[in-house]
Amino acid sequence: MTADLERLLAPDTPLGEALRVFALLRTTPEEGRAIEGVLARAAYAAVPEPLLVAIASALVDRGEDAVAARALARATSSDALMLRAELAARAADLSGAMALVERVLLRDLDWPGARERHARWGAALGIRGVSRPDPSAATMVTSAPEAPFRLTREVGRGGAGAVYEAEDRALYRTVALKVYHHAERDRAQLLHEAHVAVGLEGPGIVRVFDADPEHGWIAMEWARLGALRSLLRGRDVEALAPIARWAAPLAAALAHVHASGWVHHDVKPANVLLRAPDVPLLTDFGTARRAGEPSPPGSLGYVSPERLAGRASDPRDDVYAFGRVIEDAIEVVPDDPDARLWRVVGAVCTGRDVDRPADGSGVVSLIG
């Protein structure tokens, strides 16, 4: 074994040095042994993702696409996801490629080549391209003297509406007030969202207090710790760890949704609230559908490949999104006491459809 190869395979070699050495070895007969050595180490120990991407790129150059895809199977950096997407597209798995590139776009809409690929592959699947959020979407004035709520601050905004922290003037309590951007147009969706949430009432499901379809708002319980998205963006390890504290009851809430015959269709960090560290609340049932009904559009980065390919509503699509949420959490809390378990859960839930738990109860069993 050459000195360069020994240095590459040494576990304490700094990443920058390992990348430099591998670049040198690519021009020598030792390239094959270098690739095999790194992949062998990856089977039992963590290998930095930039090195895995370099290895996978070399495998692609050697015509070994399938081996490259396996090498990156659990990689989640944007570079790795883009290469995984390219490999999926080359293997004629355009829906899988779309799901991967959407994860990149979720982080950065301007990632080089991501929007072009999303548009090209989406056109082949009959899916329209991604667009930026519209910050000028209409909001409703609800703080007039005759209104039942006094708005305190905006806490979230999506395609359907904005969510405010608000004070109930009559009962002197804090509520989450969701105000639809287009009340008249979205009246049916508002009523659907409220009715589904009320029908599913129970642990892990946000409580609906009141709704006004005419003025386009729904009043719901206030979750004092906010949305999981804010905690992830703020890298609030204290609130997020241990992951089991909120993820296990969230899986149980999904199991309840699925046992009731519904698919949520928009499981993502923005729609998981924390009333307390161990009390997650699933919210926003506006796109929920009965299992077997046509699937509505979903949120960038959390839609399963099968749903992108046009599959009817299936609980496994929520399972995929749950796995993506877990992957997001692991990136912020890599030293979670059960990190190995949660990495497996994320990988299984976002993996091959045939290996994915069939519904939320399957996720509960997987967690143990």
Image (cartoon, helix red, strand yellow):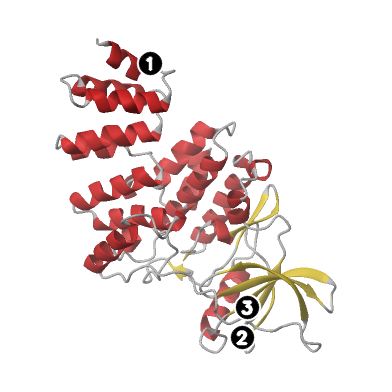
Q: Nearer the viewer, mark 3 or mark 2?
A: 3
Q: What amino acid type is highlighted by mark number 1?
A: Ala
- For the point 32% across and 26% down, the residue is 20
Quickly name the residue at label 3: 179
- For the point 77% across and 79% down, the residue is 149
Instruction: Identify the disc placed on residue 213.
Output: 2
Q: Nearer the viewer, mark 1 or mark 3?
A: 1
Q: Distance between the residues labelled 1 and 3?
A: 57 Å
Quickly name the residue at label 1: 10
Residue 227: percent from left, percent from top: 63, 58
Residue 157: percent from left, percent from top: 58, 69
User: Label 3: few (<14), some or many (≥20) within 10 Å?
Assistant: many
User: Label 1: few (<14), some or many (≥20) within 10 Å?
Assistant: few
- For the point 52% across and 83% down, the residue is 186
Q: How far apart are marks 2 and 1 (CA)?
A: 64 Å
Q: Which of marks 3 and 2 is nearer the N terminus?
A: 3
Q: What amino acid type is highlighted by mark number 2?
A: Pro
Q: Earlier in the sequence, mark 1 or mark 3?
A: 1
Mark 2: secondary structure: loop
Residue 299: percent from left, percent from top: 45, 64
Q: What amino acid type is highlighted by mark number 3?
A: Val
Relative vertical location of residue 296 with respect to residue 350 in this rendering, above or below: below
CB contact under 8 Å: marks 2 and 1: no
Quarter of the figure with residue 67: top left
Q: Quadrant of the N terminus?
A: top left
Quarter of the figure with residue 163: bottom right
Residue 318 visible in rendering? no
Left/right of residue 217 with respect to residue 92 in the rendered view: right
Q: How far apart are marks 3 and 2 (CA)?
A: 10 Å
- Seen from the viewer's position, the closer of residues 121 and 133 is 133
- Seen from the viewer's position, the closer of residues 13 and 298 is 13
How many numbered discs sit on the rendered protein?
3
